[in-house]
C-alpha cells in the first residue's frame, strides 16, 4: 500500500458531518462536539466571519469552511460536493441547522420578512435534504439527515406563527423521510430545542421594542446550555427516536400538548 493509498483509506474511515448555520450557536457547539469525537466537520454559514471563528476552535485537519446561503441550490451543490471530496466520499450526517426567527403579530409582520423566514427555515432544509440524499445513501453504514426543528413545532406559538409553521413543516418532513428513506439505509431525525442562548434570540419582535431574548427572560423561562444541545444532537444521530425534545420548556410543552391542550391553548393566547 502506498502512502497516498493509506491516507485515502484513513480519510474514508473518518466519519463526516456537514453543518449549516455553523457560524454560531447550536451549529458551532455541534461542530465542536463531533470534532472532539474525531469526526471530519464541514462548517457552512452565510456569515463568513462566524465560520472563521468556528474553524479556529476546531482541529485544522478535521475542518473545512463553506460560505453558503441555504436558499441557493447551486451553492448547496457546490459546497456539499467540495466537502465530500475532502472526506473520501463520506457524508455520515447532514445537519440542517440554519434558521432565523421573526417574532411579532402575524398581521403586522411584513410579508417580505415572512418570505425570507420560510425560504431559510423550510426551503433551505428541503434543499439540503434533496441535494444531500445521494451522498447519504452512498455512505457506507448508512447516513443520517438531522434537522433543527423546535419546541415551536410541538404546539403553535402565538407571536411566532410562521416560525412555528416552518418548524411543524420540518417535523413533518422528518417523519415522512424517515419512512421513505429507510430503504436507502438513511435515518432521519430532528432535535426540538426550546430556548437556547444563541444569536437567534436577538431577533426583533414586530410591534415591540423588545427582542425575543428579552421576552423569554420577562416570561421567566430558562435557557438550555449549548453543550447540552450538542450532546443530545449526538444522541439523536445515534439513537432510535425520530425527534429529540431538548430543554425543560420543550418537555413541558410536549406534555401539555398531549395531556392538557386546553390549558396550552389558553396560555398561547398571550403570545411569545
Image (spheres, grey):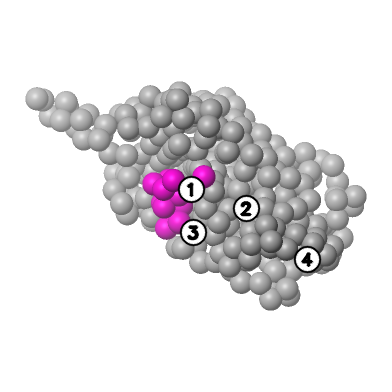
- Residue 40 drawn at (x, y percent): 34, 42
Q: Where is residue 89 drawn, in percent x and y? A: 34, 27
Query: Judging from the image, what secondary structure is the residue with disc 2 in?
Result: loop
Residue at 32%, 39% (x, y): give it. Answer: 15
Callout 4–callout 2 Cβ contact below 8 Å: no
On residue 229, the disc is 3
The residue that appears at 62% across and 43% down in the rendered structure is 171
Circle 4 residue: 263
As drawn, the label of residue 241 is 1
Q: Which residue is mark 2?
A: 150
Name the quadrant containing residue 75: top right
Q: Mark on residue 195?
A: none
Residue under the image location 69 percent in, 61 percent down: 259
Q: Is residue 235 magenta?
A: yes
* Residue at far right of view: 107
Alpha carbon separation for disc pair 4 and 1: 27 Å
Q: CA distance from mark 1 to mark 2?
A: 15 Å
Q: Tell which tag, 4 or 2, sits nearer the viewer.
A: 4
Mark 3 vs mark 4: which is more N-terminal?
A: 3
Q: Are marks 3 and 4 in contact (CB under 8 Å)?
A: no
Q: Which residues are magenta?
A: 231-242
Pick whichever of labels 4 and 1 is earlier in the sequence: 1
Whether residue 211 is in magenta: the answer is no
Q: Nearer the viewer, residue 255 or 46?
A: 255
Q: Nearer the viewer, mark 1 or mark 3?
A: 1
Look at discs 3 and 4 and give the one toward the viewer. Answer: 4
Give whichever of discs 4 and 2 has the lower sequence position: 2
Amino acid at each position: 500500500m502506498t502512502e497516498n493509498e493509506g491516507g485515502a483509506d484513513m480519510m474514508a474511515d473518518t466519519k463526516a458531518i456537514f453543518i449549516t448555520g455553523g457560524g454560531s450557536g447550536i451549529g458551532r457547539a455541534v461542530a465542536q462536539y463531533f470534532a472532539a469525537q474525531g469526526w471530519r466537520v464541514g462548517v457552512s454559514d452565510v456569515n463568513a466571519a462566524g465560520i472563521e471563528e468556528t474553524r479556529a476552535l476546531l482541529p485544522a485537519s478535521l475542518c473545512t469552511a463553506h460560505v453558503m446561503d441555504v436558499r441557493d441550490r447551486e451553492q448547496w451543490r457546490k459546497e456539499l460536493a467540495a466537502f465530500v471530496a475532502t472526506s473520501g466520499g463520506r457524508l455520515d450526517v447532514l445537519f440542517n441547522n440554519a434558521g432565523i426567527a421573526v417574532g411579532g403579530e402575524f398581521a403586522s409582520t411584513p410579508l417580505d420578512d415572512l418570505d425570507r423566514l420560510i425560504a431559510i427555515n423550510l426551503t433551505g432544509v428541503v434543499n439540503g435534504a434533496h441535494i444531500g440524499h445521494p451522498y447519504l445513501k452512498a455512505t457506507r453504514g448508512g447516513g443520517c439527515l438531522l434537522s433543527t426543528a423546535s419546541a415551536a413545532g410541538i404546539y403553535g406559538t402565538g407571536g411566532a406563527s410562521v416560525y412555528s409553521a416552518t418548524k411543524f413543516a420540518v417535523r413533518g418532513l422528518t417523519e415522512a423521510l424517515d419512512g421513505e428513506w429507510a430503504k436507502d439505509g438513511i435515518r432521519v431525525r430532528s432535535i426540538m430545542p426550546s430556548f437556547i442562548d444563541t444569536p437567534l434570540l436577538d431577533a426583533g419582535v414586530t410591534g415591540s421594542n423588545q427582542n425575543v431574548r428579552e421576552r423569554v427572560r420577562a416570561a421567566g423561562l430558562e435557557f438550555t446550555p449549548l453543550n447540552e444541545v450538542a450532546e443530545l444532537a449526538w444522541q439523536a444521530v445515534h439513537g432510535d427516536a425520530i425527534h429529540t425534545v431538548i430543554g425543560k420548556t420543550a418537555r413541558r410543552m410536549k406534555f401539555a400538548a398531549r395531556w392538557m391542550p386546553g390549558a396550552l391553548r389558553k396560555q398561547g393566547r398571550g403570545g411569545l
